[in-house]
Image (cartoon, rainbow, N blue to C red):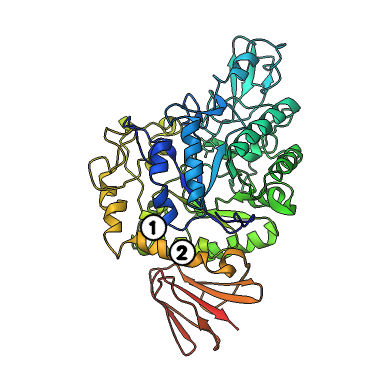
Amino acid sequence: MTTNLNWWKGGIIYQIYPRSFMDANGDGVGDLAGITSKLDYVASLGVDAIWLSPIFTSPMKDFGYDVSDYRDIDPMFGSLADFKTLIDRSHELGLKVMIDQVISHSADVHPWFEESRQDKTNPKADWYVWADPKPDGSPPNNWLSIFGGSAWKWDSRRLQYYLHNFLESQPDFNFHNPDVRQAHLDNMRFWLELGVDGFRLDTVNFYFHSEGLEDNPPVPVGEPKTMGAPHDNPYTYQRHVYDLSRPENLEFLKDMRAMMDEFPGSTTVGEIGDDFPLKRMAEYTSGGDKLHMAYTFDFLNKPHTPDYIRDVLKNMQEIVGDGWPCWALSNHDVVRSRTRWGADEDPEAYPLIALALILSLRGSVCLYQGEELGLPEADVPFERIQDPYGIPLWPVFKGRDGCRTPMVWDNSEQGGFSTVEPWLPVDAHHLPLSVAEQEANPEALLHKVRQLIHWRQQQPALVNGELSQLDVGNAQLIGLVREYQGTRLLVVLNMTSDTQQATVNSGLVEVDGHGFTSTLEGQTLTLPAYQAFYARLS
Ligand code: NOJ
């Protein structure tokens, strides 16, 4: 077990979607015992930590992102004892354990909400965001739910509306109430005391709303819709000035950090959905007194052209400063990156160079289950769709099921995931890419990913170094310098499908072991399609 308290800085976090990782009890849904049985595999990748999407008691309307008991495990996944076993085994293998905290909203069947909705005077009356209708009976303002329609739902008991940024069954907590804030901190402490090492904080900038309930303004004509939601979703038409990213949140995050600091080596990574995410990341992660890291959507939203990558890095440097990003190419909410950006590219080389990119940046990295196998988005027929976000926006937006289908461990009928038909179908196209198939083939992507990760973990400049961009005289190439304790590492990445060349200074000491095949002859650097080059600079 590493004793480095800053393991998360530059660390690699493997995201597990528990419903779809491994089904040990044969009910078609993944579980904790299943995850524990596969931890050796995860550790073999060379990652530092696992992040488990929610495992708590839930009606599962949003597949666990709707919690009805913050201190227990949903029986579908197992028990607290199973979770303790998972933590212990992870720690034996040198893996940290991070769990998802979904505290901006609860499930509507949470006892707190059931009490809150009874009347306007009960002890939990002010724990959620309640508001009277306008005189004409319509909702209090124009706020929208990301999942479609108004963010307000009428409640016939209280004769008031309640706020929900996501499903109607996910009522929003009122963080202006100090008891709510304290209850959440106490629940987080419960998990830290049980042995978890950190939290992924769901929608961390949605905790507070403006108590004035002002209407959000529309995105001004001619200005881009910057909110990270599908553009066919009217949620992107507004500037979210009053319903999220409120200044009070910073004070709460400081209280949270003070509690986290009582558990040395623990960490947080916040998910920020905002009109101006980098600005928010800077606010939330700089100064060392709020979040440790914030998740960035930059490589989830747009194609990875060299110009775009340069822009992202420039903005990151200018805006985020000493803040700390956590990069990702995929997660459980977006189309798998192989399909999103690599569909027309080489199916093995593209995922590897994309991973090399984020492993070469200043920041931490999240790797989503199956990314190491290069899985494409699964095709889920409409009648098997489960995601409540996908059903109303079908067919333009098909929801998030295509990236949530079961992990493929072997090429048997259910991919070795389960002995029965799983909750989402295994895509037949995934079977030849299963772990067992790839383990048996020394040329497979899985081995290259493993090699690259293990190599990167041995490069202090890549894990911890400062980053500057370098113009290598060829606009198709990304040039970076990472510098740590006097060692300067040159990184050149060819994200294109053509061979690229650059002229570099003499005196470079090539670093190998990463598995890429670029060549340096004299001062001429040749990078075949999708290849990287690393060298020490004197
Ligand atoms: C973000 C999560 O990643 C997503 O899966 C969930 O639906 C929403 N937050 C609501 O909790």
Image disc number at residue 488 = none
Q: Position of residue 301 (x, y in %)?
A: 51, 51
Q: Which is in the foreground here, disc 1 or disc 2?
A: 2
Residue 214 appears anywhere in the view: no
Inspect the image, locate mark 2, and give the three-letter code of the amino acid beneath it: His
Residue labelled with disc 2: 454
Q: Is residue 219 left or right of residue 304?
A: right
Inspect the image, locate mark 1, and give the three-letter code of the amino acid beneath it: Gly
Q: Is residue 533 above or below residue 331?
A: below
Q: Is residue 503 left or right of residue 342?
A: right
Q: Is residue 64 above or below residue 262?
A: above
Q: Is residue 489 above or below residue 393?
A: below
Residue at 44% x, 53% y: name it: 43
- The CA span between labels 1 and 2 is 24 Å
Residue at 38% x, 43% y: name it: 37
Residue labelled with disc 1: 342
Q: Position of residue 332 (x, y in %)?
A: 46, 42
| Number of dots carrying numbers | 2
Q: Position of residue 398 (x, y in %)?
A: 40, 38
Q: Is residue 481 above or below residue 446?
A: below
Q: Upstream in the sequence, badge 1 or badge 2?
A: 1
Few, some or many residues within 10 Å of mark 2 (<14, 14–19, 20+): some
Q: Is residue 459 left or right of residue 428?
A: right
Quarter holding the N terminus is bottom right
